Amino acid sequence: MTFTKKNFKEEFEERLQERFALSIEDASNKELYETLGKLVTSHYSRNWKHTRQDYLEEKQKQVYYFSIEFLPGRMLKSNLLNLGIYDTVEEGLKDLGISLDDLAKKEPDMALGNGGLGRLASCFMDSLASIGMPGNGNGIRYEYGLFKQKFVDGYQVELPDEWLNSRNMWEVRRESKAVDVHFGGKVYLIETPTGQLKPMYKGGYSIKAIPYDTGMTGFENDTVNTMRLWSAEVTEEEKANFQHFENRQELQNLTSVLYPDDSNEHGRRFRLSQEYFFVSAGMQSIFNYYKTLDLPMTEMNKAIAIHINDTHPAMCVAELMRLFVDEEGMAWEKAWDVTTKVMSYTNHTIMSEALEKWQTSLIKEVCPRIFQIIEEIDRRYVEEWQGVFDDELIKRTRIIRHDQVHMAHLAIIGSHSVNGVAKLHSDLLKSVVLKDFYAIYPERFNNKTNGIAQRRWSQLSNPLLSKTLDKYIGKTWRKDTGDLRLLLNHENNDKLLNDLANAKYENKKRLAAYIKEHNQVEVSPDAIFDIQIKRLHAYKRQLMNLMHIIKLYLDLKENPDLDITPRVFIFGAKAAPSYHFAKSVIKLINETANLVNNDDSIQGKLKVVFLENYNVSLAEIIIPAADVSEQISLASKEASGTSNMKFMLNGAITLATLDGANIEIKDAVGDDNIAIFGLTEAEVYRYYNEQNYNASDIYQNNPIIHRVVNAFVDGTIPNCSMEGQQIFDSLIKYNDEFFVLRDFISYCEAQEWIDESYKDKKKWGKMSLTNIAHAGHFSSDDTVRKYSEDIWRIAPIRKH
Ligand code: CJB
């Protein structure tokens, strides 16, 4: 049945009455939102059921994407879009005097992730469904998402994100699929009469894992996949047991918060327990499903692929071995063979602090059987390669070393595929970070450059741009963003360029209004909107951006008539609660903003805005309004980046180092349509090898840098002498770990080029168009298609 506006209005009013016994005039936006949410889920529930049944009947090979983070953002609009009913619903609501935008804002952001890693997982969920691939998510249903950020006196303050206080419209609790996860105690291996070793557990405790499933709708294709998030619940019986554990509070609240502080023992054990919890629950439920297929255990790889997203779920390898060997009585060798065929792993960073290592004593305490299995994998690994590779290489690549368990090593040794997330990153894995493993398993290494769910980052967040595109190149780009290339036929079409510029201007007005409301700062949409949004981290170098702002400010103070295009520098970033450096940078940016925004002598030529509580929904307002996309990490450090792709799709010009996927963006748009600056990765490594980076020399010898760096300690920026000193020391005393000073001048020159280029509206418009035209390269539809073909070996589902 076609879904007309009339049908919609009738159904909507009926459901509102049924659910709340209200008519539209009496209902709040929240009630209207919930009514709409219910209506939407009822529209896909049939297809959700069918999709699951089809997979089962066909014994279709499925991938399970294990990720400790998912960052879906709001789902109302994306479901409407995917179900093909967005316009009907929007117009129907309008007839009823309701704004879809107002209702959409009532949905809390599902913020079960920190940043790029979690957002990528959600883009993949969307794309898997949209290309009709059998793909499931497996993660944790945190009761509190990533903290809400507030600024108090310019300092970051963290508040809890109680997103579940308002009902989650999209999840379905599936108690019937609950499993028990066992923690702690002691394990003894008992020899059975057949000579097999069987584990005997003594003590310990179980936690009930309850799955909450969320339908992942595909774009106009009737596919609805599942993201399964696990919640920990403790039975009354176990609670009594828990009295013996000093950490009982922690156990009862295992899935309460995302990423607890891991700087102390308490935090670490908590984190490891969370990891084992969602790994074991997920693996058990896959196992239960596989058993219903009635296929031999030794052929699991024909029906199941398991993806380890970063090192957090690396215990999947050992847990699958446990299920095979302990529960099914399979011989170790056979079990190992299937396990490695089932598993694959993505590395997302070369930053060593993110490559998890656990004290052996801690793993032994939390999941003793898993530790034994890891020990055995490690022992056999050494045995296998002894005499083939030199002893040192084997030592360096072992899983257990110096009383620590190296989770990346476990993931690599236990998988058939290891990939990085952009060409440069994957090359660095082979040549530096995982060089030893590349020597042993060259065939496992491959690259899969990240991508983004382009429908969300264009059709949903930028309807004005989308309508302009429709007008000139038709609508096929909405399904296949490769067709954005058609824009290239119009690069000299002044009318089109003008329409694009108008759409951008309107989006800038929308953001300006948001800024006015939230920061009480007036910004002009005629200024360049220069934006850096991402987690606050030293390697991402928000500090360099700030230094450039300080330089411009000092230049303007010296010469108020300086001819620069007015600029609004916009930041959005959360700092990890215990990351002092990052928090100091936030304070400094906020104080600089205060100083600059209130100094009339610079005639409004500079504005600085730090938006609070950056998240997916805010990104949807910010990105369409960007003129300049700041991607300025030290070359080699940003594995890929994905906001760079979102900005480009929205016509911003990328200002970038040759890092991560910036390189591939440059290759796609050509040198003339991007501003590249700074050291190359090879140059960075030369400094490392020769150990001759000297920040103090640069500071002493370059008067511009000298003056800007001094601003941190000479009172130029008020109210932050402690933070200023800390940053000063990080640059000078501790030799500027991320080479900010070395790249600074080159960055300023690139910024001057931006300033000049922006003055030529036509040139800028063409650059912007070229960026949009090539953005189709970075669709996560294509990325997951490649994962599906090369790694998971899964195919699109048969249509029901
Ligand atoms: N990434 O967000 C995280 N968290 C981590 O712990 C490690 C990496 C990011 O993953 C993104 C998706 O692959 C990358 O685009 C980004 O460069 C990386 O920092």
Image (tube, grey):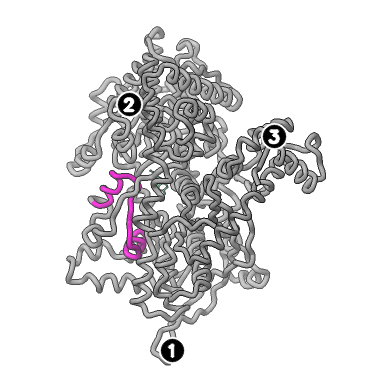
Q: Which mark is residue 192?
A: 1
Apparent side of residue 128 relative to residue 771 in the rendered image (left or right):
right
> Tag 2, which secondary structure?
helix
The number of numbered badges drawn on the structure is 3
Q: How many other residues sit within 10 Å of disc 3, few (<14), some (14-19) or many (≥20)? A: some
| Circle nearer the N terminus (3, 2) | 3
Q: Which residue is mark 3?
A: 93
> Tag 3, which secondary structure?
helix
Which one is in front, 382 or 7? 7
Position in image of residue 191 (x %, y %):
42, 88
The residue at 51%/64% (across/down) is 282
Which one is in front, 480 or 658? 480
The residue at 42%/57% (across/down) is 795
Q: Is residue 428 magenta?
A: yes
Q: Which residue is mark 2?
A: 673
Q: Amino acid at mark 3?
A: Leu
Position in image of residue 365 (x %, y %):
47, 69
| Circle nearer the N terminus (2, 1) | 1
Which stretch is magenta? 406-430
Q: Image quadrant of residue 547?
A: top left
The residue at 47%/44% (across/down) is 115
Q: Which mark is residue 131?
A: none
Q: How many other residues sit within 10 Å of disc 1, few (<14), some (14-19) or many (≥20)? A: few
The residue at 23%/34% (across/down) is 694
Q: How many other residues sit within 10 Å of disc 2, few (<14), some (14-19) or many (≥20)? A: many
Position in image of residue 331 (x %, y %):
37, 80
Q: Amino acid at mark 2?
A: Asn
| Circle nearer the N terminus (1, 3) | 3
